[in-house]
Image (tube, grey):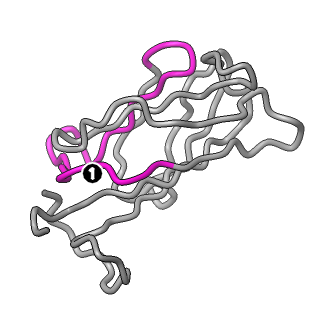
Amino acid sequence: MASRLFRQFSKTLESGVVTLYANIPIGASGAVGTLVSSKNQGIYSVVKDATGKYIINFGTSASAIDTYTRLLDVTGSALLTTASNVSTIQASADDADTGSITILTLDDTGAAAHPDNGAVLLVTIRLKNSSVR
């Protein structure tokens, strides 16, 4: 489990709910730009794995990984001044117990798509940081 100081009192029946916010800049061909640490607290890297497929790694570095009991929810949108070719951001793999999750960016037909060059993916990730029921 992640051993960090999190804010208290989320008012939920789940114990130890943690919310992380990702701000992922996108370059040409869906490449991940440089993450700003103050906009990605609790996230040390995002790696493009394939077209429209990104692995989000939790922690402060590769040697300081945060692990969680399970993934509760992922929501996201593409921030862009024009209409985005990404209509859906969804979770596709829950590896929170080893320190990462995988998300997909999909177009309006449901096919994997590169986000537009210059877009920023805004992703909210809710995780469980407790084994207490």
Q: Main secondary structure of the magenta part?
A: strand
Total marks in image: 1
Considering the image in quadrants, where does the N terminus appear?
bottom left
* Image position, residue 98 (x, y; %): 16, 39
Q: State the SS at label 1.
A: strand
* Image position, residue 95 (x, y; %): 24, 36
Q: Determine if the magenta segment contains residue 65.
A: yes
User: Looking at the image, which is closer to me, 21 or 68?
Assistant: 68
Mark 1 residue type:
Thr
Farthest residue, direction right: 82
How packed mark 1 is, by other alpha carbons closer than 10 Å (few <14, some 14-19, many 20 or more), is some
**Residue at the spot of label 1:** 60
Instruction: Please state if 31 lies on the left or on the right of 19 as rendered.
Output: right
Q: Which residue does the image show at 60% across and 49% down from the upper left?
A: 122
Instruction: Please state if 59 lies on the left or on the right of 47 as rendered.
Output: left
Where 123 falls versus 53 (above or below)?
Answer: below
User: Looking at the image, which is closer to me, 23 or 75?
Assistant: 75
In the image, the segment drawn in magenta is 49-74
Q: Which residue does the image show at 65% across and 35% down from the upper left?
A: 88
* Image position, residue 20 (x, y; %): 41, 59
* Image position, residue 117 (x, y; %): 73, 26
Where 28 falls versus 68 (above or below)?
Answer: above
Q: Which residue does the image show at 33% across and 80% down from the upper left?
A: 7
Q: Determine if the magenta segment contains residue 48.
A: no
Q: Which residue does the image show at 13% across and 68% down from the upper left?
A: 133
